[in-house]
Amino acid sequence: MPQGQRVLAVVVTWNRQALLAESLRALQRQTVPADGIVVVDNASTDGTAGLLRADFPDVDVLAAAHNTGGAGGFALGINRALELGCDAIWLLDDDTVPEPSALEALLAARRDYPGDPPVLVASRVVWTDGNDHPMNTPRVKPGLRGDERRDAASVNCVPIRSASFVSVLVDARAVRERGLPVADYFLWNDDFEFTTRLIRGRRGLYCPASVVVHKTATFGSTDADPGERFFYEVRNKVWLFGRSAGLNPAEKAVYAGSTVRRWARTFAKSGDRKTLWRALGRGLVAGVRTAPRPTAEVLAGGTRKGATQDGATYDGSDG
């Protein structure tokens, strides 16, 4: 980052104490460290609060009064980072372990990119065996112009249209202009909606030099058998295609077709299709009949009084 600019990391966690500790230690070992770390504890019951107090006293902790899901957690964390004042925010899941130079590479791509800085730069995500994780491999931006490709190549990056919260550096000014993640998504597609909204009409990059390990239990993509959670995939996709400003009409048609194909693979691989059919029906009805509530409404009173380590609480602001 240019001198005087400030970067904060935001990590959202729920009942993964050991993985969280590994992730935070990796953040502390960065060759270019963040200026501060915000952890959103999504009402964990596994001793996470005690771990943070004992082993990571310098981390700014937001303790959610209830589990707000990944969507609510990142909305809380990003809002807190904006309150603290920053120029860029590094978003990570609690099972993400960044290599020592991960942030340095993201910052270099952002700094050296020709023209206006990209609104986001995403890391290369690998599994524990070093292979690219299929759950978090960003797609190359469709319909690329030659100048976009050249500008990205000049910093050894690739233009993308969306990214995942597993490891992505986002521009704080762009977030202030275009808003927080939609907390009512709870889980699934919240990062897709948020990052497409940030990137639309602007530039987003995939940076292979920035490497993080995503320590999921298994190696696989999002079409693995989700059970009842498929409801969120369906409802949120209907909300996204029908109500989000992240994609233009042509893009919505392309991504909708891709979604239907992925759902077909999910059903084909499932050992419990009855549950998936039930979740599909519920998700379609909810997606059509309802709309996501404003994030400020969803998260109002979302943290316990005095729950942050410096005494701050979430004030319901939408940033």
Image (cartoon, rainbow, N blue to C red):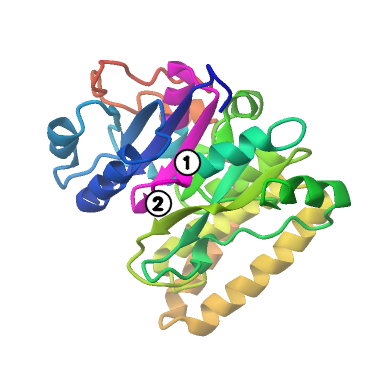
Q: Which residue is mark 2?
A: 99
Q: Is residue 91 magenta?
A: yes
Q: Nearer the viewer, residue 149 or 141?
A: 149
> In which image quadrant can residue 66 be found?
top left
> In which image quadrant can residue 179 be found?
top right
Q: Is residue 140 left or right of residue 183?
A: right
Residue shown at 15%/30% (left/top)? 53
Q: Residues within 10 Å of mark 1 (few under 14, many from 20)?
A: many
Q: Is residue 196 left or right of residue 91?
A: right
Vertical placement of 205 versus 56: above or below? Answer: below
How far across and how far down the image is residue 251, in percent?
A: 78, 54
Q: Is residue 162 left or right of residue 47?
A: right
The residues colored magenta run 76-102
SS category of the residue bearing label 1: helix
How far across and how far down the image is residue 200, in percent?
A: 74, 41
How far across and how far down the image is residue 269, in percent?
A: 49, 83
Vertical placement of 112 versus 252: above or below? Answer: above
Residue shown at 79%/58% (left/top)? 142
Query: What amino acid type is highlighted by mark number 1?
Result: Leu
Q: Which residue is mark 1?
A: 103
